[in-house]
Amino acid sequence: MFRTLTTLVNGANARAEERVRDHYSIELIDQKIREAEASLKAAKFSLASLIQRERSEARQVDALSNRIADLTSRAKLALADGREDMATEAAGAIAQLENELKVRHTTVERLETRILKLRHSVEGATRRITDLKQGAIAARAAKKEADIQRHLGRHVSQDTAFEEAEELIARVLNRDDPFEQTQILREIDEGLDRSDMTERLSDTGYGDPLKSTAADVMQRLRANT
């Protein structure tokens, strides 16, 4: 029972966290970008420090190489002049400088390797932050559009004006045509009216004609001539 309650509480907490993350998604994205930029800035400072150390070690290497070359030249002159004691002392100093030079060469190589790796990391982080910023712009636009759609949908679902307008349009479109009704009524009245039956029979040739025609007048004129 306790395990079930724990599972339910954990599930409720997870859902609440998801709702909070969804609601503040843009703010969280911006915050994560700021954190990434802070990490990138720290990495750049570390890279600058490594480059500074590498350049300092490189200068030390150059200085040691110059001192070794100078001492070697002077030791050769002393040896040629028969001053083996001074040449021997110079040889000891040269050996010490060469050992130090070897250590500094190793240090420079190690620093160059670290600089190369960190530089690649900084470049990759810079590209990722650029992508994140572009993604944040797209996410902000998408969230704004979704908020507008949700706001509009909420008002549309609560507003009956749309349904009322559609109903009125349907009633107008389905209403009977008054002109057609008038024509039909006229046809009905004509069908029920029998007052013109005599004229209709006369027009079809049944019985004497009720009206004079031009042909009748011409016939009378010819008969009187």
Image (cartoon, rainbow, N blue to C red):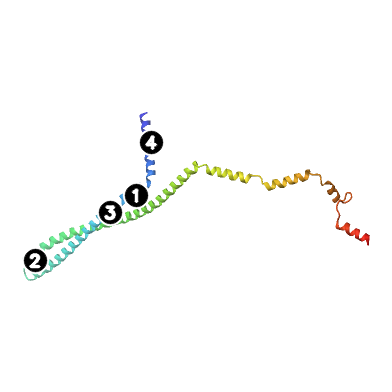
Q: Quadrant of the N terminus?
A: top left
Q: CA distance from mark 4 to mark 3?
A: 38 Å
Q: Give the x, y percent position of residue 72.
A: 13, 67
Q: Which residue is mark 1?
A: 30
Disc number placed over residue 169 in the picture, else none: none
The disc, 2 or 3, on the residue closer to the chain's N-terminal end is 3
Q: Earlier in the sequence, mark 4 or mark 1?
A: 4
**Label 2 neighbourhood size at 10 Å, few (<14), some (14-19), many (20+)?**
many
Q: Does residue 114 appear to the left or right of 7 in the view shown?
A: left
Q: Amino acid at mark 1?
A: Asp
Q: Secondary structure at mark 1?
A: helix
Looking at numbered disc 3 in the image, what kind of residue is underneath it? Lys
Residue carrying label 2: 87
Examine the rendering and report whether any part of residue 199 can be seen.
yes
Residue type, numbered disc 2: Ala
Q: Earlier in the sequence, mark 2 or mark 4?
A: 4
- Along the horizontal axis of the image, is 5 left or right of 174? left
> What label does residue 12 carry, if any?
4
Q: Which mark is residue 41?
A: 3
| Mark nearer the viewer, 2 or 3 | 3
Q: Residue 51's x, y, as percent?
A: 23, 58
Amino acid at dot 4: Ala
In 3D space, how far apart are the residues under numbered discs 2 and 3 (Cα atoms)? 53 Å
